[in-house]
Amino acid sequence: MNIILLSGGSGKRLWPLSNDIRSKQFIKIFKTADGYESMVQRVYRQIKEVDPAATVTIATSKTQVSSIHNQLGDSVGVCVEPCRRDTFPAIALASAYLHDVKGVAPQEPVVVCPVDPYVNNDYFEALHTLSQLAQQGAANLTLMGIEPTYPSEKYGYIIPETSDAVSKVKTFKEKPDAKTAAEYIAQGALWNGGVFAYRLGYVLDRAHELIEFDGYQDLYDKYATLRKISFDYAVVEKEPNIQVMRFAGQWKDMGTWNTLTEAMEEPGIGKAILNDSCRNVHVLNELDVPVLCMGLQDVVVSASPEGILVSDKEQSSYIKPFVDAIDQQIMFAEKSWGSFRVLDIEDESLTIKVTLNPGHSMNYHSHQRRDEVWTVISGRGRAVVDGVERPVQAGDIVRMPAGCRHTILADSELKLIEVQLGREISVQDKEKFPLEIVSHGKEKA
């Protein structure tokens, strides 16, 4: 089974745990035997449980690539969008990537779905059936229609011709108000969850009809010039040969704090204390300080280096315009090599706690307008400064004046405090180089 997972969005509705780099699908809230997993980890695990041979490709932006590799490893396929151009260009690019890079044949079926639904394994078994329907070719597009549990205003609706498990599509309806949604449901309408399947060649043909390009690389190079348009508008609503398959299992969109907390198995994650008079209260705390809640009802409390949210659960759905008005440096991010957390910001200094995963390293790079100092607080590794490699361990200090090239390689999990010193500290002040080691120093750094 070939699956394209669409991973987009800035995650502003789940501030302060999400930001422009760390979207909602990377927040670890689902309890496992070993700790917690994120939405993307949960979905990827479920796919592999149902179909171990499934080929998974995540269509995403540059800002999310590091988080994907951090949480899923390097084996998952990633199709990077150079910029945001809505779902049709994203799916066209991912389809071209499957064909040209992964060697998927045009007649093979492909399933497209969001990366962040909260579902059970029967959902992925249904995706397998969806893939088989696409392979059979009775329709050019096969959609999954979710059996609605209430008249939602958040989703578009699919009205099938019959009540059969698989039916031709009669019509589509835009997101309605609650009263109209109830009328649609009375007609047998299904939620449009953005899940569908097709033969790879079908979408490649549609893409060539709407975009002039010659293969994956050419499409990637001209991506920024493409018109922003959704897959629904560009393809689905113009396709006459289309069918829908009903799905009646659990399906939740984890798009708001209210829906996210419904999926939590415990009231608190992190240091959280709730007294006995709290009712329907959830706390997600990433700070190393306790959060105490007393006598609250229907409230979500979330604390991270980005900020603190205290909200009525229903009101939390209206968070986005307030977060849009917040202009703040990213305080936490996952990278392909580990993660960093900003500890302190001054006019001419920035202090960061860096964690490198075993066997990983930063890019070999330099800065022209700032000095840096690393203090290793745990673990072992090797620092490389201007081509000279030195072993480092807890208590060692590495100094890097502006202009020198440097990196650090983790032999075990390695934690360090990085202090940046300069009048112009900026993420743009960074130049990357291929790693070159010219000598090995034996003394401590």
Image (cartoon, helix red, strand yellow):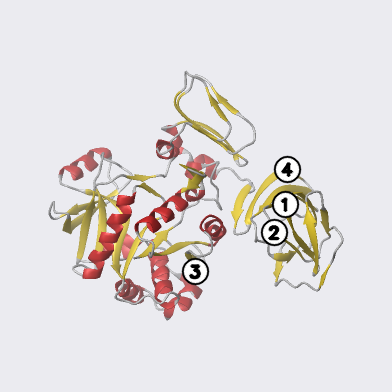
Identify the disc placed on residue 224.
3
Find disc 1 in the rendering and name its residue: 379
Identify the disc placed on residue 2.
none
The answer to whether residue 353 is above or below residue 438 is above
The answer, for residue 370, to whether it is visible in the render is: no
Where residue 111 appears, x then y in whole percent? 33, 63
Quarter residue 161 falls in: bottom left
The answer, for residue 14, to whether it is visible in the render is: yes
Where residue 110 appears, x then y in whole percent? 33, 67
Find disc 2 in the rendering and name its residue: 411
Cα–Cα span, label 2 and label 3: 40 Å
Pick the residue in front: 6 or 337.
337
Cα–Cα span, label 3 and label 4: 36 Å
For the point 21% across and 58% down, the residue is 244
Comes first in the chain, label 3 or label 4 = 3
Mark 4, other Cα within 10 Å: few <14 / some 14–19 / many ≥20: few
Secondary structure, mark 3, is helix
Quadrant of the snapshot with the C terminus = bottom right
Comes first in the chain, label 4 or label 1 = 4
